[in-house]
Each structure stands twice: as C-alpha cells, then as structure tokens.
Image (spheres, rainbow, N blue to C red):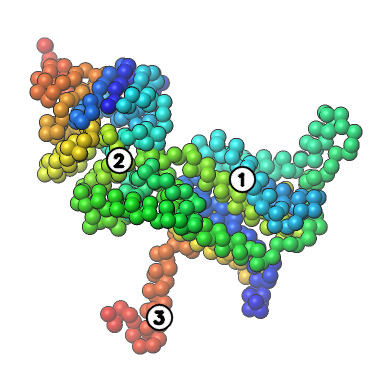
Amino acid sequence: MGFLASVGLNDFVITLMFVNAILAMSIYLTLYGGMFSLANAGFMAIGSYVSVILTQNHDWPFLPAILAGMVAAGLIAIPIGLPVLRLRDIYLAIATIGFVEITRIVILNFDKIVDEVYTRLHMTSEPPKITNGPLGITGIPVQTKLEHLVIAVIILAYFMMRMHRSRFGRALAAIRQDENVAASQGINVVYYKNVAFVLGAMMAGLGGGFSGHLSRIIQPGSYGFGTAVDILAYSVLGGISSWYGPILGGLALTALPEVLRPLKEYTGLINGIVLLIFIAYLPGGLGDPALWRSARKSASRISNFITKGKTADAGA
Amino acid sequence: MLVLKHVSRQFGGLMALQNVEMHLPAGNIIGLIGPNGAGKTTLINCMTGLDHPTSGHIEFNGTPIEKKPAHRITALGMARTYQNIRLFGEMTVLENLVVAQHGLGRATLADSLLQTPRHRREIARLRDNALQLLKRFHLDQSADVVAGNLPYGDQRRLEMARALATNPKLILLDEPTAGMNPVETTELGEQILRMKADGKTLMVVEHDMSLIAQVCDEIYVLNFGQIIAHGTHQEIKNNPVVVEAYLGQEEGA
C-alpha cells in the first residue's frame, strides 16, 4: 500500500476505483446488447439517494440499504426501459440523457414536491426534508469499505463472465449485431433488451449506494451529464470486447488523474491525451484480448532477448 | 401450410403489396419471381413478422400471424434467409448456429450462473445440432472461423444452415443464389431438394430461372405488388403477361 499511496493512490482513491469499476460494468451490459444508453448516472443517483436516506433517516443497516437502493433503481428502470428502448443509437443516448436530467431535477426539487402534496392534502404536520435540495445530504458517515467493493466486483465479474457464455448473453450479442435477424431467429428482442437495461440499472444503483456512503456528501449536481459521460468513458477505455475490459477501464481512468496530480495544471491535458491515444490506437480498449496476446508475445520476445541474447523471431 | 388472403402493405402513398393471395401447400417448393422492386422482399418481411401488412390476413398452419412479432412466428416454425447476407458477423460459424437455436433452448441466466446440469446438457445438445448442420452444408472445417471472414459462397450456405437450425416447417429463401456461379447454383438446388425430402416446405424468391425450373413445384409472379400469374414452370414461361412484365410490351402490339 505504501507504494500506491506514494503515487497518489490512497485508500479513498482505491475504494473509488472499485466503485467506478462497478459503474463501468453497469453500462457494459447495455452496450453488450447494442444499446447506447447513458441512463446509468440517473440510476446511480437513485441508488445513492435511496440508500443514504435509508441509513441516515430511517436507521437502516448499511448492506440492506445498499441493496434497497439497487432494487429501487431496477424498479424505476422497468417503466423507463419499455418506451425508451424502442429508440436506437444516438436517439437512445439523447433520450437517456433526458432521463438523467429529469432524475437530477426531481431530486433537486423533491422536498418542494412533498411540500406541495402536503398542502394539497391539507395535512397539518410539517413536511419532512428528504433530499435537501441543491445542498444535498451532508455528514454521511463513511461506511463503504474496500472489502465490500472487492467482493461486489468479484461477484459481478463472475456474473459477466458467465453471462457471456449463457443463452441470455448470446441473445444480447445477436441483438447487438443485427436486431431484426435476432428476432427472426426466435429471440424476443424487447424482453432481452429490457432485462439487460434493468440489470444494468441495478448495478448502477449498487455503485451509487457505495459511492453515497463513501463521499460523506451527496448532491443532485454530482449525477448529471458529466457523470454519464464519465461512466461511458470507463467502459470505452476498458473496451467492450471482453468482460474484464470495463473493470480495467474503471480502475485505470479513476487512478489516472490521481497519479498525474504532481503535474498540477497539466493533469487534465495529459488525461485527455491518454484518452485520445487509446481511442485512436486501441479501439478495442484495455481489455481487448488481442492486445493481451500481442503484449504476451512482446514480453516473451523481450525475455528471450534478455536470456538468450537473441529475438524470438530470429531464433525461430 | 401458409395462406395469404388480401394481403396489402402500404408505405405512405405507395402500395408495395396489393391484395396478394397465396397458398403454400405443405411439402412443396413454391417459387416467387418478379422484376426488381416488385415487392418480393416486402412480402417475405410481412410473412416473417419483420413488417406487418396494412390489411389482410396471413395464416400459418391455421394460426393468424399477421400481427405477431417475428420471434413468435419463428417459434411457430418459420425461418428465412436474406437477400443481402445478414450473418452475425462477429461470431464464429458455430456460434451463429448455436444462437440460432435460441428458441429450442430453455436455460435461464441463473442456470448459467450456477452451471446447472440443465445448462451443460443444453449447450452440448445445441453444439451437437450445430455441428451436424455444418457437416451437411460442408462447413465443418470452418466451425471456428469468424463468420464475417468466410468466403461469400460459404456465407450463403451458413445462412441457410442458420435458418434450418430453428427447426422450421417452412423456410423462405430470399434470392439464395445471388452472386453464385452455375455450379454453386446447381449444388444449392440439390440442398433445397434435400430439405424438401426431409419434409420441409419452402418458398424460393429468385431471379435465376434455372434454379426455379430445377426445384419449384409451383410459381407465383409478383409485379408492382400484385400477383399477376400463378402456375407451373411451363405455364409461367409461356404466359404473355409474365413475359410483358419482364421484357416490356411489344411495340405496336
């Protein structure tokens, strides 16, 4: 841990890296089914607020509250997915950004809405402050621990790995490659798209719950368009050609700005350049199996060169 | 097997199909020919549920299907190929045939997560079926090749194998010989006749009259969205209406 801390990766950053790995996996699931959905920042907000309100206002224990946030995000995803997933590509992206913004604004004004309901129903009691508007909920004790996240990432990684080889995963891959043909091969496209969307929303809700109990404060402004794009970037950098790509992407892209912190004002610049290089030269992302194969090959060539003083090619 | 009554499909002001009446008897090979733009592909799309008729009825073994989604119609036993090849290009040849058997599998995501015996048995069964189909279409050497990298003729055959993988009763082939040489076309005709011998019903949309002559029991001719002729190959060949549709009216006639 000493080395990691010396390059800027303290315990908080490492914990955050794993939170973002979960968020990266959440968007991967929809991308795998060919859906360009950016809704996960909204589901993250729902998971975060629901779990924090349960632990802070209703004295729920940490883990049940986190799971409740995950379920809440999944339940809200059902009525959102049914109409929105009829759209494709960029239109789906725009509609889901709309959902993210609506979620943010509803959270922002939630207390006013409750207030209005109380007035309309002529209730005499004082309306409660639930989301606390733009100030958000503050003073949340840190309950998310690295071991929770490592366990969660392992479980989700196992899920992803198996998902690929399952009937469900094959159906999603077929839908991504040609929706109409998938339907003609007997795949219920609407059903599978919605299930993937809901599962992705639940993962985002889980990530939101963990992040809410990590950052001490949650505000509606933390779950806007920027967050939606960040989540997408984790997945793109990691690559969607393998199940471990998004995990690597989430970890790496969270660590990068912290490692670059000594560069002070150049941090953003270098961060951007690294992203551009990845998109231009490694479109398969960090998790591209081809990248790892060639990396292994060059590694063995280098080790051959060191041990035998000649290249593997020359020796062959 | 398949009955179409007064089927019409309108795109805005354009009547792509107009009062189409067809009857595909079980165990036969029916040809559907017509000039480019006649509405042949629209008709197939309406039959398979990728598109839906504006009016009219389609019955498949007595079940009305004109409003059913594609995956339901596939489950009832209909399969198709595409005029422009539409394989799952990123998957291997074998995976294409495994995913094609989706409707024949029952394993859930939970089965796969827990690696239940049901999941293992099902995967083994679907792979076996897929390998048998590959042998039949002489593609077993290419089982692990990514489908998008296959040579053109092999892609055509893989599409046909994929259609068969759903275990259909009726198979609709949309221009199966497009881009093939005469030898390949004859060989494909033999595959089609073999499917008939296996008890399948087929409809073949084609421009290649030699294939039509080789395999079809009956032929329908579509022009400007209407069926203009129906009969055996001999009857169609000598039908002046059909000749006119393809070659235009003789001047001064």
Look at mark 2 in the image and give the residue it sits on: B167
The answer to whether tags 2 and 1 share a subunit is no
Badge nearest the viewer, 3 or 2: 2
Cα distance between the residues tagged 3 and 1: 49 Å
Residue A16 rendering spot, x and y as whole percentages:
65, 63
Q: Which residue occupies the foreground of this view, A283 or A200?
A: A200
Which element is circle 1 on? helix
Badge nearest the viewer, 2 or 1: 2
A139 to the left or right of B28: right
Which element is circle 2 on? loop
| Chain letter for mark 3 | A
A177 to the left or right of A235: left
The answer to whether residue A275 is seen in the rendering is: no
| Chain letter for mark 2 | B
Look at mark 3 in the image and give the residue it sits on: A302
The answer to whether residue A155 is seen in the rendering is: yes
Q: Residues within 10 Å of mark 1 (few under 14, many from 20)?
A: many
| Chain letter for mark 1 | A
Identify the residue at image location x=78%, y=36%: A113
Q: Which residue occupies the foreground of this view, A281 or A67?
A: A67
Q: Residues within 10 Å of mark 2 (few under 14, many from 20)?
A: many
Q: Which residue occupies the foreground of this view, B68 or B91?
A: B68
Image quadrant of residue B170? Answer: top left
Query: Of marks 3 and 1, which one's residue comes earlier in the chain?
Result: 1
Q: How many dots with numbers?
A: 3
Q: Quadrant of the C terminus of chain A?
A: bottom left
